[in-house]
Image (cartoon, rainbow, N blue to C red):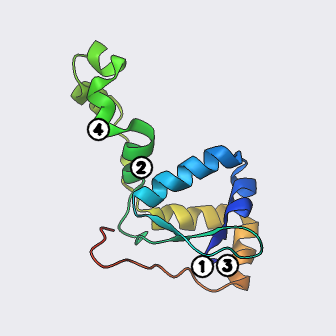
Amino acid sequence: MPRSVGELDLGRKLRVEADYLGVLLAKLKAMHLIGKLQQERGQAHWALLCDPSRVTLRTLYDRLVLNLPRLPRTALAQQLQGAEVLRSILVNPQLDQPLEVVFREQVAKDPEAVEMMAARPTLEVVVPPGARG
């Protein structure tokens, strides 16, 4: 797996517009999950900073999809008389998988990713001092 991913390459792979990708990368950076590296071949590169064996999909889902701090103020939560009811409806055990498992499954499904892994060095996880995984 590559040590870093180019922003343009990532946008093409995910098939998302640059503006949307920029917002998403900024959110992941603010969560201290990824970090921006120097530009290489005319594009910014990003690297994983967290330990993918310790960070779960739930972390991403809760912060990026549900936005738990705002959940109690949503109209749906108010209609259901509280955010706890809404949270219980949204229980999904698959969200408790570590990112490492998701990455492995993706590589198994994507032959291009297998070729990339064979041709490039292993992903190096860098955890800054005091950071939570």
Q: Amino acid at mark 3?
A: Met
Marks 3 and 4: in contact by CB < 8 Å?
no
Structural distance between the alpha carbons of marks 4 and 3 = 38 Å
- Residue beneath disc 4: 69
- Give above or below for 49 relative to 33: below
Lower sequence index among marks 2 and 3: 2
Label 4 crowd (10 A; few <14 / some 14-19 / many >=20): few
- Residue type at mark 1 is Arg
Residue at the spot of label 2 = 94
Label 1 close to label 2 by CB (< 8 Å): no
Residue that carries the numbered disc 3 in the rendered image: 117
Which residue is the site of mark 1?
3
Residues under numbered marks 4 and 1 in contact, where contact means CB atoms less than 8 Å apart: no
75 relative position to 111: left or right: left
What separation in Å lies between label 4 and label 1 (alpha carbons)?
Answer: 33 Å
Camera-side residue of 108 and 24: 24
How far apart are the alpha carbons under marks 2 and 3? Answer: 25 Å
Determine which quarter of the picture holds residue 92. top left
Q: CA distance from mark 3 to mark 1?
A: 10 Å
Q: Residue at x 69, y 49 (%)?
A: 18
Q: Disc 3 or 1, which lies upstream in sequence? A: 1
Disc 3 crowd rating (10 Å Cα; few below 14, some 14-19, many 20+) is some
